[in-house]
Amino acid sequence: MKIYTKTGDTGQTGLFAGPRVSKNHPRIESYGTVDELNATIGLTRSFAPPAEMDSLLETIQHGLFAVGAELATPDPQTHGTSMIGESAITGLEAAIDENEAKLSPLTQFILPTGTRVAASLHVARSVCRRAERCLVALQQTEPAVSLVPLRYLNRLSDLLFVLARVANQESGIPDAGWQKPAAD
């Protein structure tokens, strides 16, 4: 089987069990950004985070494939692509709580910097926030789209922020606090 099909050469792509739509359709933008997030997390994993964090990130990557499948399907319930549920969201919340307990409370805004793992997690967090915005735009044009993927991405962005702080802390790098510029 060849990787190229030439069916997208005119700017259209096919949805799973659905019609062909423009490649800039909000649905394509949504699952494309989720795919970018997944690749960014893969990049983070290439920097060899601690084993426990790497395992969590792998689980998240599998979850993101499920989110992408649901978003790529106009009727996910009928076609069995609605695979992310409340347990995935509560799993993210538990991971946030567990990792946040390792950290000192935030007292100021922090810069997205630090180790390669932490900086990459901050990039992933910002891509995750963009995926959320894309999904909100999709839900405004297609109100039947489930809110579960949006809630999953919202929790995930929080978790990625916490994991970035943990990665820095475990490497002995303190949070870099934002310093307000002096007024002219």
Image (cartoon, rainbow, N blue to C red):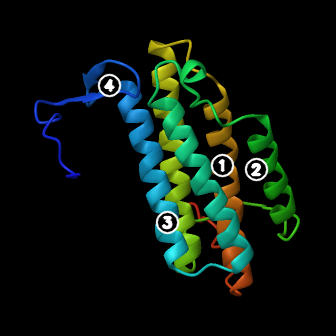
| Residue sitting at the far bottom | 172
SS at circle 4: loop
Residue 98 drawn at (x, y percent): 86, 62
What residue does disc 3 label? Answer: 42
Give the spatial CA distance, label 3 vs label 2.
18 Å
Among numbered discs 4 and 2, the one appearing first in the sequence: 4
Q: How many other residues sit within 10 Å of disc 4, few (<14), some (14-19) or many (≥20)?
A: few
Place of residue 16 in the rendered image (x, y in percent of width and height, measured from the top left): 40, 28
Kind of residue indicated by mark 3: Gly
* Amino acid residing under circle 4: His
Q: Which residue is mark 4?
A: 25
Label 3 vs label 1, nearer the camera: 3
> Is the C-beta separation of discs 1 and 2 under 8 Å?
yes
Q: Which mark is residue 92?
A: 2
Left or right for 124, reference 97: left
For image coordinates 86% across by 56% down, the residue present is: 97
In the rendered structure, the answer to whether residue 181 lies left or right of residue 105 reads left
Vertical side of 79 occupied by 51: above or below: below
Image quarter of residue 26: top left
- Report, in whole angstroms, how far the alpha carbon at label 4 lies from the one at label 2: 29 Å
Q: Secondary structure at mark 3?
A: helix
- Label 3 vs label 1: CA separation? 15 Å
Q: Amino acid at mark 1?
A: Leu
Residue 23 visible, this angle: yes
Residues at circles 3 and 4 in contact by the CB criterion of under 8 Å: no
Image quadrant assignment for residue 171 = bottom right
Res. 156 mark: 1
Residue 68: % across, % down: 49, 39
C-alpha gap between disc 3 and disc 4: 26 Å
Cα gap from disc 1 to disc 2, whole angstroms: 6 Å
